[in-house]
């Protein structure tokens, strides 16, 4: 027979830790973008040889922004 996990095993992570994690993701994405641009002198999003690094940058920045927005919305009572 299969075992079931208990329903009440969720751990509450403080909001300030999650906001700092998502802020770090956003900062890492921006640092990658700026450092790549300075090292290779390429700021063109549409250049074929730069699509990989910009995809990584957009993933970091996207997750960072969405996480910050979701955790900064005040809960309704």
Image (cartoon, helix red, strand yellow):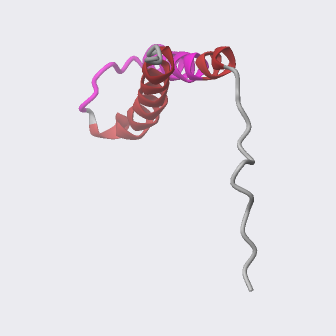
Pick whichever, 66 or 25, lies toward us: 66
Side of 56 relative to 42 (left or right): right
Residue 45 figure quarter:
top left
Q: Residue 34: x percent and y percent?
A: 47, 14
Relative vertical location of residue 2 with respect to residue 7 in this rendering, above or below: below
Judged by its main secondary structure, the magenta piece is: helix
Q: Which residues are magenta?
A: 22-46
Residue 8 forms part of the magenta stretch? no
Q: Residue 38: x percent and y percent?
A: 47, 13
Pick whichever, 69 or 31, lies toward us: 69
Residue 27 forms part of the magenta stretch? yes
Check the image and name the residue furthest to the bottom: 1
Q: Residue 46: x percent and y percent?
A: 24, 32
Residue plotted at (56% across, 24% down): 25
Residue plotted at (71% across, 43% down): 10
Q: Quadrant of the N terminus?
A: bottom right
Pick whichever, 18 or 3, lies toward us: 3
Check the image and name the residue furthest to the front: 77
Q: Residue 50: x percent and y percent?
A: 36, 34
Residue plotted at (48% across, 14% down): 72
């Amino acid at each position: 027979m299969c075992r079931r996990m208990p329903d009440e095993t969720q751990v509450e992570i403080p909001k300030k830790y999650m906001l700092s994690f998502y802020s770090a993701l956003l900062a890492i994405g921006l640092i990658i973008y700026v450092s790549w641009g300075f090292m290779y002198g390429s700021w063109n999003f549409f250049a074929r040889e730069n699509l990989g690094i910009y995809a990584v940058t957009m993933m970091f920045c996207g997750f960072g922004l969405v996480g910050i927005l979701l955790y900064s919305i005040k809960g309704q009572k």
